[in-house]
Image (cartoon, grey):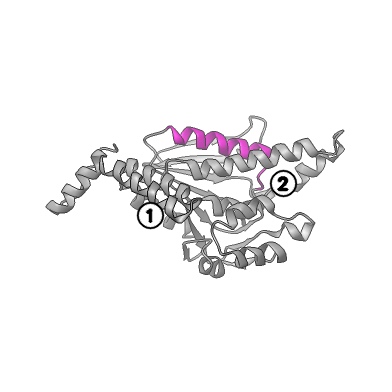
Amino acid sequence: MKAQTSSRVAPAAAAEPALLRDNIGSIAVLTLNRPKTRNTLTEAVLAALADQLTAIAKDRAVRAVVLTARGPAFSGGHDLKELTARRSDPDGGRAYFRHIMLTCSAMMQQIVGLPQPVIAAVQGTATAAGCQLVASCDLAIASADAKFGVSGINAGLFCSTPMVALSRNVTRKHAMDMLLTGDLISADDACRIGLVNRIVSPGNELDAALTLARKIAGKSSHVVKIGKAAFYRQLEMGLDDAYRYTAEVMVENMMARDAEEGIQAFVEKRPPKWEDR
């Protein structure tokens, strides 16, 4: 895999950048780069992810995003040592805990709100907020060795914020099973219950995610943006409201230049020439 450009995104004082970005054609690859600490979502990592997502949202050259990680863990979730250190604050850490949970929640919502699709390439264990990160992505490719869990219950901390993304991916009983037991589930089980889309042999998850990203990048980015936004919005509606809303979305989509071109290309049996408008 040869990146066209790369950047190092992390606090200047860090010996190693906490987050890497590589641009591979029209695909932005974000790599969690704290393998020795299981790629925990520290305050600095959350900020770096938020900054990159903000930049990518405005970058018309980026047509899809792949989120991956280095090391044996995709992400171990929140850094409990970082959180525990704030118990000595005058309020026992309450204000900082709220700050971290709201910061993390905002970043997860950035992924959902991003115009470009985001694909998780999961090479290892994704637990707690790390599992939330996978669930927040639009698509997920997992190594056959990957494992998933919302294990906070084992440490006396119910994974309430990870539950939001998890319960929007899998059925209620599967979500409650994971939340109440804290057990890790296999990649096969994660695929069976709808947390991930596909399983590949270990070491091939990034290539598989890039292949999928390139396929999506070949579509009209304007139409993908319309569709992604509509998908998440209609999920929160009742059936009648969802149909009324998506009917209007379809009308607006039909008025787009790329819909006109795409339909004409289909009729003429030729590849479409997208203008992304």
Outermost residue, top direction?
Answer: 12
Residue 16 visible in image = no
Q: Which mark is residue 79?
A: 2
The three-letter amino acid code for the residue at tag 2 is Asp
How many residues crowd around disc 2 within 10 Å: few (fewer than 14), some, or many (20 or more)?
A: some
Separation of marks 1 and 2 at Cα, in angstroms: 32 Å
Instruction: Residue 27: give its label.
Output: none
Using the image as rendered, state which of residue 158 and residue 139 is in the foreground: 158
Magenta residues (range): 40-58
Which residue matches tag 1?
211
Query: Relative to 181, is 135 on the left or the right?
Result: left
Answer whether residue 268 is magenta in the image. Answer: no
Which of marks 2 and 1 precedes in the sequence?
Answer: 2
User: Picture coordinates of residue 262 (x, y %)?
Assistant: 22, 47
Residue 207 in the image, given as x and y percentages of width and height = 43, 55
Is 167 placed above or below 2 here? Answer: below
Instruction: Report if residue 171 is visible in the image.
Output: yes
Q: Nearer the viewer, residue 205 or 83?
A: 83
Task: Write the residue at 63% across / 29% down.
Answer: 12
For image coordinates 33% across by 44% down, the residue present is 223
Kind of residue sitting beneath label 1: Thr
Residue 219 placement (x, y as % from top left): 31, 47
Quarter of the picture holding the C terminus: top left
Bin the neighbour count of mark 1 within 10 Å (Cα to Cα): few under 14, some 14-19, many 20 and up. Answer: few
